[in-house]
Image: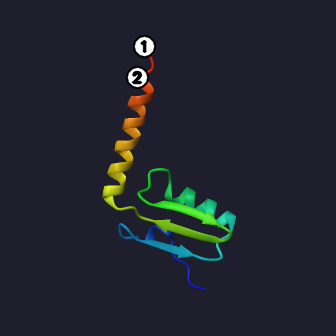
Amino acid sequence: MVQIEVRQIRVPPGQRIQLENISWTDFEAILADLGERRATRIAYSEGILEIMAPLPEHETAKVFIGDFVKILLSGDEH
């Protein structure tokens, strides 16, 4: 069996990869290894791990929507 480190995996923006037969323990170890400040999105279901790299324009929209919601919620403080 060949083993690689998670940091060796590169996912181009807009792409995704799926890894099969991943245990929950392995999933938790992968999350810990990648840390909180990662550029990829990770999903896990029934032994399948999916790593996605969003396109930069998706991230821009996410920040804009988040800021907009903050403005709407803070406007009710008067």
Q: Mark 2 and 1 residues: CB-CB less than 8 Å, in contact?
A: yes
Q: Which residue is mark 2?
A: 75
Q: Position of residue 45 (x, y in %)?
A: 64, 66
* Residue at point 31%, 56% (across, down): 57
Q: Quadrant of the C terminus?
A: top left
Crowd rating for badge 2 (residues with CA inside 10 Å; few <14, some 14–19, many 20+): few
SS at circle 2: loop
Q: Give the vertical position of 20 relative to 76 (above or below).
A: below
Q: Position of residue 52 (x, y in %)?
A: 46, 65
Q: Position of residue 11 (x, y in %)?
A: 41, 70
Q: Is residue 54 left or right of residue 32?
A: left
Question: What's under tag 1, amino acid-wise?
Answer: His
Q: Is residue 45 left or right of residue 73?
A: right
Instruction: Tell me the number on the disc at residue 39.
Output: none
Residue most toward the bottom?
1
| The one of 30 and 52 positioned closer to us in this rendering | 52
Image quadrant assignment for residue 27: bottom right
* Residue at point 61%, 64% (across, down): 44
Q: Position of residue 62 (x, y in %)?
A: 39, 48
SS at circle 1: loop
Q: Which residue is mark 1?
A: 78
| The one of 28 and 58 positioned closer to us in this rendering | 58
* Residue at point 36%, 53% (across, down): 59
Crowd rating for badge 1 (residues with CA inside 10 Å; few <14, some 14–19, many 20+): few
Image quadrant assignment for residue 75: top left
Q: CA distance from mark 2 to mark 1?
A: 7 Å
Question: What's under tag 2, amino acid-wise?
Answer: Gly
Q: Quadrant of the N terminus?
A: bottom right
